[in-house]
Image (cartoon, rainbow, N blue to C red):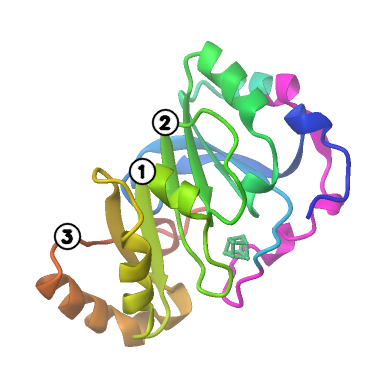
Amino acid sequence: MIHFETKNGELLPIADLFVSLQGEGFNTGKPVFFVRLGGCNVRCSWCDTKESWDGTSFPLLSVTDLYKKIADSGQKRVVITGGEPALYNLGPICNILKDGGIERFMETSGTSPIRGDFEWIALSPKRHMPPLKENLERASELKVVITSPEDFSWAEENRKYVNEGCKLYLQPEWGAREEILSRIHNYLLSNPEWRLSVQLHKYLNIK
Ligand code: SF4
């Protein structure tokens, strides 16, 4: 959990700030300003941002200064990701972004209560640390990473709790994509409510 003072979300640990294209899920291809927060208690074995796990190793930035960087970029859409961003109160940064007319997206495992006014919440449930039901009900998008055939039933288990409008995605884990893609393909053909998400940024070799 959090071992440092974030002043209830007025300060946030910044692991990375960059502009790129959203590479996954429903918003794939949209230009966004990424705010990668440090700190994650979920610890997935296949995590591709392990350097972000220790939140104490990153500088704290005030939401005012963070907003200024985002506004200066000229981007009108922000993705707050991690790490696990739901560890923090994201109400203050959401409020200031909303006042500035900037769209607010979030990527989360859903394991901690989500605080903040988001227009899009992409929830990626982890089998070893399941998401809170209240977060599943709030998700705009359920994106299940498929690492093995057992993950299809895990995807369906989570689907039971999402809202009616929630978009459903299956995404091959990057390291297992060669073996698992054909299984996902077959699954989608007989379960057409689901869509395929691939990590476009990795195929394009961009951040
Ligand atoms: Fe990595 Fe995300 Fe899993 Fe945390 S929840 S370990 S950041 S993949």
Q: Do the residues labelled 2 and 3 touch (CB within 8 Å)?
A: no
**Is residue 60 shown in magenta?**
yes
Label 1 sits on what residue type? Ser
- Mark earlier in primary sequence (2, 1): 2
Q: Is residue 202 left or right of residue 48?
A: left
Is residue 37 depicted above or below 155 in this figure? above
> Within 10 Å of the Cα at label 1, are there few (<14), some (14-19), or many (20+) other Cα atoms?
many
Determine if residue 165 is in view.
Answer: yes
Q: What element carries label 2?
A: loop
- Disc 2 designates what residue? 119
Question: Is residue 199 visible in this depiction of the protein?
Answer: no
C-alpha separation, residue under disc 2 versus residue under disc 1: 8 Å
Which residue is label 3 attached to?
193
Q: Is mark 1 within 8 Å of ligand 1?
A: no
Closer to us: 23 or 11: 11
Mark number, residue 140: 1
- Quadrant of the rendered image containing residue 192: bottom left
How would you rate the neighbour count of disc 2 (Cα within 10 Å): few for under 14, some for 14-19, many for 20 or more? few
Residue at the (73%, 54%) spot, across then down: 39
151 up-or-down from 11: above or below:
below
The structure residue drawn at horizontal position 24% and vertical position 46%, both measured from the top left corner, is 164
Are circles 2 and 1 on residues that touch, CB within 8 Å? yes
The region drawn magenta spans: 43-66
Nearest the viewer among 102 and 205 is 102
Q: Which residue is drawn at 72% across and 19% down?
A: 64
Query: Image quarter for residue 177?
Result: bottom left
Outermost residue, right direction? 4
